[in-house]
Image (cartoon, coloured by chain):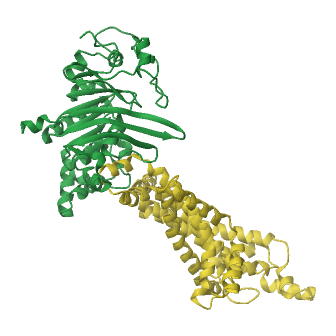
């Protein structure tokens, strides 16, 4: 048992995804790799457009087909490479072993179906042997699990508030006891008090069912509260990766430092936030050297010339930078 | 919901009265004397005057209008045709089955073929199948129906002798008229379906459905199509009325004794009761089609259903 807990449950290796738009090619994800153990939570942190959602959709193989192309890499779940599976086999995994919570609860539910039926749909897909009555009862149980009265089974999404809709989405995602939960900015569209409720709910349910989770967010506070490991994504690459402690205490990559610096600190009298200057690079035309070099205050000629590799600067703490962490 | 329907039915009545008023007034002020028309060029002035008296044309506008409205809406009598002396109501009843059969079957073809073609094009967006489907739709829209009707007669009736060139004698007499009257509607519907399918194609809830492990076919049928249906229903309502009201062309090309042809002969003969009767019939038909469209909205979308009920409740509170 302990051995099984130690081996990687989800192993993502060198995945690369591009989007084609006209003649331009958008390099959305460029060789991302990470491992997760069972029950662990990994935070994917980064700016809008860094490729976080694309990574999650690639794992579930639901990238929008015409523009997105999966160029290469392996995604192993329990030793099975999901990329090699047929579409038929993948259907059995989606919603059952891997489930996803979406960013915007306002649009993630089908407006023409009752919330109960939407939960029922995923249950029916993955529990073919059970009777419909039994599954309807279970869908009701799921509603109660996320603190929505069972009586509201037959109501439509427009009759629910944003926070309640997100709870329905969570109920839908957890309905089949997934082993891996992909939470794509589950709280971004909600206001702060509801955010806390939803995060608590996710954490509670996750602990109850020992579900592994990838939490996509740009909120470092949420990461600190929820995650075991953190991967900082910049321009489709992991620039810093490690357990929460090393990222928060031994922040190394200039981009991560910039992210922390840009948080408001109420303990210090400050009038202005410290943003990272500049804009993320154009993903159709990434810089030759380090992708962060145009915005990096420490950048040298070396940074602009050569693309840095991910280096282990302390056990389990990886950084993609030419300069930082060398002295250690 | 029931209150909403009731309100809409009351509105239909108002629309009918307005339509009757407008068509009566337009015909009244149309130049040309129906009495002279009926009697022919050789009639004496006295005969014409007599005829005008018989038809009631010598009475003032308001009296004529009042009689017409009274007969139409309280006695449900549209009068007799001046040329054939047959009650217009009876004649409409005889002709209705032809118009409705052609219109109804064209509509069924429109829904089935148009939806399938549109869904097919949308799910193959940007590929050659999409282009082919849309080129077919473009051709269908562009072809004038009278021309297509005549060309089909030349091909299938004259050259190949597969189908009768006109009339309603056999069931297969209806094949050509139905094709001609459905083809433009199919194309419009296919294009409408394609564009509204593409609109919901990238919706988040479609991704949600895929993430559940739902098969793509079921995602299209269960999640995309119902959400794409609203604009499609709107255009279907218009299509149905234009098929029926526009049936005059097809009916005259194929000599089908339908309502459209009846109205055309009424117009050429200055047979006012016939024209008025047909216009009122088309107005009623359109109103009912639009009412059905609105009810279909509520049936498809729970948000609209809630709105209907809410607006009825609001009215109640206000009153």
Q: In the depicted view, which residue is nearer to us: B206 or B99?
A: B206
Q: Is residue A225 above or below residue A175?
A: above
> Quarter of the image holding residue A60?
top left
Question: Residue placed farthest to the bottom in the image?
Answer: B169
For residue A55, side relative to residue A212 (left or right): right
Q: Quick one: which chain is green?
A: A
Q: In the depicted view, which residue is nearer to us: B130 or B7?
A: B130
Q: Looking at the image, which residue is at 43% across and 21% down?
A: A289
Q: Looking at the image, which residue is at 37% across and 43% down?
A: A106
Picture coordinates of residue B174, whole percent (x, y):
60, 83
Q: Looking at the image, which residue is at 64% across and 72% down?
A: B245
* Residue B67 in sight in this render: no
Q: Colour of chain B?
A: yellow
Picture coordinates of residue B30, whole percent (x, y):
81, 71
Q: Is residue A4 above or below residue B164?
A: above
Which quarter of the figure is the N terminus of chain B placed in?
A: bottom left
């Amino acid at each position: 048992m302990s051995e099984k807990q130690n081996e990687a449950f989800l192993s993502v290796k060198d995945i690369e995804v591009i989007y084609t738009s006209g003649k331009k090619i958008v390099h959305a994800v460029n060789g991302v790799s990470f491992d997760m153990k069972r029950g662990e939570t990994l935070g994917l942190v980064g700016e809008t457009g860094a490729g976080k959602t694309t990574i999650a959709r690639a794992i579930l193989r639901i990238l929008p087909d015409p523009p997105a192309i999966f160029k290469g890499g392996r995604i192993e779940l329990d030793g099975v490479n999901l990329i090699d599976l047929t579409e038929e086999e993948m259907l059995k995994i989606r919603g059952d072993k891997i489930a996803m919570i979406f960013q915007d609860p306002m649009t993630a539910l089908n407006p023409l179906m009752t919330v109960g039926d939407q939960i029922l749909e995923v249950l029916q897909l993955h529990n073919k042997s059970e009777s419909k009555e039994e599954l309807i009862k279970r869908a009701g149980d799921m509603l109660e699990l996320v603190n929505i009265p069972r009586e509201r089974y037959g109501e439509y999404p427009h009759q629910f508030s944003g926070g309640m809709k997100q709870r329905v989405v969570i109920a839908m995602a957890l309905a089949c006891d997934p082993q891996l939960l992909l939470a794509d900015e589950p709280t971004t569209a909600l206001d702060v008090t509801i955010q806390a409720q939803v995060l608590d709910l996710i954490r509670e349910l996750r602990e109850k069912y020992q579900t592994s989770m990838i939490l996509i967010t740009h909120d470092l506070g949420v990461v600190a509260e929820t995650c075991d490991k953190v991967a900082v994504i910049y321009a489709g690459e992991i620039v810093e990766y490690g357990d929460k402690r090393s990222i928060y205490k031994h922040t190394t990559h200039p981009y991560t430092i910039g992210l922390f610096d840009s948080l408001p600190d109420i303990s210090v009298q400050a009038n202005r936030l410290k943003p990272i200057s500049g804009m993320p690079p154009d993903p159709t035309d990434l810089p030759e050297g380090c992708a962060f070099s145009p915005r990096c205050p420490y950048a040298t000629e070396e940074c602009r010339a050569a693309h840095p590799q991910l280096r282990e600067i302390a056990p389990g703490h990886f950084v993609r930078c030419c300069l930082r962490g060398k002295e250690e | 919901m029931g209150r909403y329907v009731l309100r809409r039915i009351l509105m239909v009545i108002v629309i009918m009265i307005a339509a009757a008023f407008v068509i009566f007034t337009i015909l009244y002020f149309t130049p040309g004397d129906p009495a002279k028309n009926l009697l022919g060029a050789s009639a004496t002035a006295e005969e014409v005057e007599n005829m005008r008296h018989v038809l009631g044309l010598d009475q003032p506008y308001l009296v004529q209008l009042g009689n017409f409205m009274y007969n139409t809406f309280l006695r449900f009598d549209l009068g007799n045709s001046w040329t054939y002396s047959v009650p217009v109501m009876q004649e409409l009843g005889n002709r209705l089955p032809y118009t409705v059969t052609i219109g109804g079957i064209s509509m069924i073809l429109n829904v089935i073929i148009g939806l399938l073609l549109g869904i097919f094009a949308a799910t193959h967006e940007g590929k050659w199948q999409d282009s082919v489907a849309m080129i077919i739709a473009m051709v269908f829209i562009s072809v004038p129906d009278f021309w297509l009707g005549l060309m089909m007669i030349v091909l299938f009736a004259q050259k190949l002798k597969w189908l009768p060139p006109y009339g309603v004698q056999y069931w297969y007499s209806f094949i050509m008229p139905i094709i001609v009257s459905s083809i433009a509607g199919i194309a419009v519907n296919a294009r409408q379906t394609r564009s509204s399918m593409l609109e919901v194609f990238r919706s988040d809830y479609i991704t949600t459905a895929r993430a559940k492990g739902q098969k793509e076919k079921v995602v299209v049928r269960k999640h995309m199509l119902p959400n794409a249906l609203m604009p499609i229903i709107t255009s279907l309502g218009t299509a149905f009325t234009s098929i029926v009201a526009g049936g005059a062309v097809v009916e005259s090309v194929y000599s089908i004794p339908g309502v459209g042809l009846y109205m055309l002969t009424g117009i050429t003969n200055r047979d006012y009761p016939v024209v008025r009767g047909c216009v009122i019939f088309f107005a009623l038909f359109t109103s009912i089609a639009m009412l059905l469209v609105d009810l279909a909205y509520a049936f498809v979308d729970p948000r609209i259903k809630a709105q209907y009920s809410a607006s009825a409740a609001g009215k109640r509170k206000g009153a």
